[in-house]
Amino acid sequence: MVTNGIREKASMCDMMDSFDSDNVDRFSNIVAAKFAKDNDMPAIAGSDSHMLTTLGKCVNTIESEDNLDTIPQVMKRGQVRIAAQDYATKDEVYEHARYILHISRELLLEYALAYHPRAPTGPPSGPLTRTRGTPIPCSGGPSGLCAPSGQAGFREC
């Protein structure tokens, strides 16, 4: 949250999500934990679960009455501790990425068509696919390949 979300406004929060099991870079968790400590904020953990397999990777223990309404108040007072924190596995990260791409497919396609109108819209039609910076089939280039103008190692067709 501190590195890629609300940044400088994070000090306005009541507590800091200082461990997110879905953070692949792990650096964000270190920065968030340090921020919470430096700003005397309670630190909590979250699994950021979008899949069943990552539920429970993080557990917070809250010292509270048996009443849901008191939980936010006691958490703000720091009566919470991180009882378990574990990172998502590589397979879980890939599963989450596939999920995000699947639910974002239409938006990604709209963006690609709006900002890259010359990009192919169908499946690849040969051994090489046309993506940015990747050689594409053509006639006249070395070994029948060429690349975008100015790319080293290939002739412009």
Image (cartoon, rainbow, N blue to C red):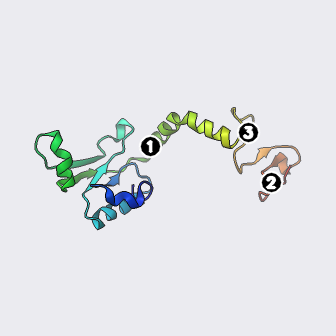
Q: Given the image, on which type of amino acid does mark 1 rest?
A: Asp
Q: Given the image, on which type of amino acid does mark 3 rest?
A: Pro
What is the crowding at mark 3: few (fewer than 14 residues within 10 Å), some, or many (at least 20)?
Answer: few
- Element type at mark 3: loop
Between 44 and 152, the one lying in front of the other is: 44
Q: Residue 99 location in percent, x, y?
A: 47, 37
Residue found at the very far right of the displayed protein: 140
Label 2: which residue?
A: 149
- Marker disc for residue 127: 3
Residue at screen point 36% across, 38% down: 53
Label 1: which residue?
A: 91
Q: Residue 118 location in percent, x, y?
A: 74, 40
Q: Residue 2 location in percent, x, y?
A: 39, 58
Query: Is mark 2 in CB contact (under 8 Å) with mark 1?
Result: no
What is the crowding at mark 1: few (fewer than 14 residues within 10 Å), some, or many (at least 20)?
Answer: few
Comparing marks 2 and 3, which lies closer to the viewer? 2
- Element type at mark 1: helix
Q: Given the image, on which type of amino acid does mark 2 rest?
A: Ser
User: If you read the primary sequence from the N terminus, does the residue marked by circle 2 or circle 1 appear first?
Assistant: 1
Where is 137 relative to 45, above or below?
Answer: above
